[in-house]
Amino acid sequence: MSDHAREPLLASLIRATPELAAVLDADRRPTFVNDGFAAAWPRPGAAPVDDALDVVHPEDRSRVSAAFARLAESGGRPVSVDARIGWGGTWRPVHARLTDLRADPQVAGTVVHVWEAPDGRRTGWAETSGEDPLTGLADQVRLLEHLDGYRSRLQPGVLLICNLDRFRLVNESLGTAAGDETLVAVAALLSQAAHEGDLVARLGGDEFGVVCPHVGRRADELPEALQAALRPPAGLGHGGHPVTASIGISSLSRGGSTIEVLAAAKAAVYLAKRQGRDRSEVLDPAAQDTVRTTRKRSSELRQAAAEGRLSLRYQPIVDLPTGALVGCEALLRWDHPQEGTLPASAFIGLAESDGLVAELTDVLLEQVCQAARTLKDGGPTTAPYVAMNLSPQQLADGTLVRRVEAAVERAGIEPCQLMVELTETTLLSDEDAVTETLEALRALGAGVALDDFGTGYSSLLLLRRLPVTQLKVDRSFVSEITRNGDDLAIVASTIHLATTLGLTCVAEGVETEEQAERLVALGCHRGQGYLWSPAVPLAELRAWAAEHTGTAEPAEAPRVDPVSHARIMQLHRSGASLNTIAAALNHSGERTAQGTRWHSRSVARVIARAAYPELHSRT
């Protein structure tokens, strides 16, 4: 590849790398910052910072200034320094690496690459010893020096970056001591899998690097060997959390600086996680735009969560016989400044792959519990429940139950006002952990709904294994119950199954009165859909609830005399609608045995009693 063709590729790598990278001119003013730096910079879009030292802690500025002076005399070798950087009074320890590329016309400045200091453990600010204090492996600085040596001697080789998958769950559910124990064990396994002459280093957090030469097919075989060393049963599994790794690969003989080689490997790690984790990837030019766009969107999502631009919409769930509000489903939305309101399906996968699920869970729990409190204070005598959809990562999080308890206590509500909704695919990643969480939530008092019932392969088996309290009939079946006999049979069977097992049955996607009438006739308990309302903000839901208080009709089918019964069935067989039958009875002066006027749903219960006695007889 020519230097000219390589320029946009290298720029993409630098922009996509998750670390902070910048280029400074001779006066230390930033002339370029990558996406990570731009997201963290104090005044995005404002006037440039006069001097990079402005973001360095006052006590560390002399040390950083001395590092710049050493760089000028280093003969082209990079210089490293530890310092604290920040803005707004918040400081964080980092390790910075300075590379003088003023002679390179494509850069024309000093490249500054910044990483978080490993675990924030350094309390002094002396130069690094080259050894990671926790694992005894080489540290990041030593790895970079090793890379410089390889590349200066023009030796072929590869750099592998290994990032553990879902390691955060170990720390959050079992504590940092268990996390440290896992990291030490991973370091030992990686050292055993590597060959003599390879350098294994810990770069910080749960990230490791391996520098190795090309020997035959080792460049292809080593990533699989490293991953196999971690996978159960031979590998690690701490407290029910199996440890796997995503690996990014970069060639040492590729063009560009050492920092660009490192950036390519880390961008490849990101791609591996996006492709499903526990795999390895080599970042080729075709993947650059995808990585860069995804990193930018991840930064936007994190910022949206921090700024309160993730909100909920609520779709009412009604009691089908009476029309009264009994609950609502909370649907997460991202109010994007350019793209408008985005559904959760547009960003939940990104949140999972980028470790943002915890932030989304906090937003969801806080708003759901506050909504339940609002509906309790201003709603009917029986407080409506609020259902929330949780992803596999959220349900496998060992801290979820504690966080639910805390959110419930802060809001001053009862756990029974919460319903957790999951689909069959939720269990595919970690069934044991998900089941354990659901059982704990049921013990707490929350409900559990199995969503999209009937669309998976093992829905019936799930009813035996999971503490389900509610079945939700998928909208694809409900939409055709008035036109398709097969769908009608599926819905009727699901309602029968739910009733037999003592579960509440909710029909999703109800859009017409005819569908609602048919569902009432089948004995369905609850409905949800555009017939009543789309998903709306909480204030609109409260207004809707105030206007739709439901009827005062009894839940049981009304008693009727033989004349009314005969008249109802005659009109029904002639094809009259439920509303027409009710109007005809009211016009003739007939009333139910309770003395109330006939209503379409009370007519439906009479028909259901005659047409589906085996369903109607069940509560």
Image (cartoon, rainbow, N blue to C red):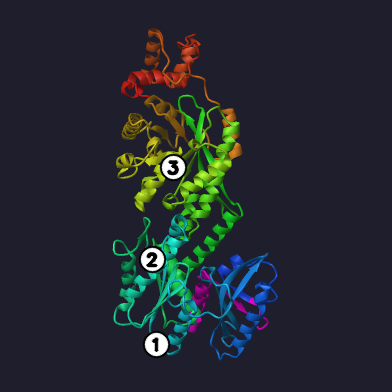
Disc 3 residue type (three-letter): Leu
Q: Position of residue 536 (x, y in %)?
A: 56, 40
Identify the residue position indicated by label 2 in the image: 245
Instruction: Give the residue drawn at x 70%, y 75%.
Output: 50
Residue 338 can be seen in this image: no
Alpha-carbon span between mark 2 and mark 3 = 30 Å
Q: Residues within 10 Å of mark 3 (few under 14, many from 20)?
A: many
Identify the residue position indicated by label 3 in the image: 441
Q: Secondary structure at mark 3?
A: helix
Alpha-carbon span between mark 3 and mark 1 = 57 Å
Instruction: Give the residue drawn at x 36%, y 22%.
Output: 616
The magenta region covers: 1-30
Q: Which mark is residue 341?
A: none
Residue 411 can be seen in this image: yes
Q: Position of residue 316 (x, y in %)?
A: 51, 35
- For residue 595, above or below residue 16: above
Q: Secondary structure at mark 2?
A: strand
> Horizontal placement of 150 versus 228: left or right?
right
Mark earlier in primary sequence (3, 1) = 1
Disc 1 residue type (three-letter): Gln
Mark earlier in primary sequence (2, 3) = 2
- For residue 577, above or below residue 593: below
Image quarter of the C terminus: top left
Identify the residue position indicated by label 1 in the image: 155
Closer to the eye: label 2 or 1? 2
Disc 2 residue type (three-letter): Ala
Q: Out of 484 and 11, give the one closest to the viewer.
A: 11
Q: Out of 488 and 58, give the one closest to the viewer.
A: 58
Mark earlier in primary sequence (2, 1) = 1
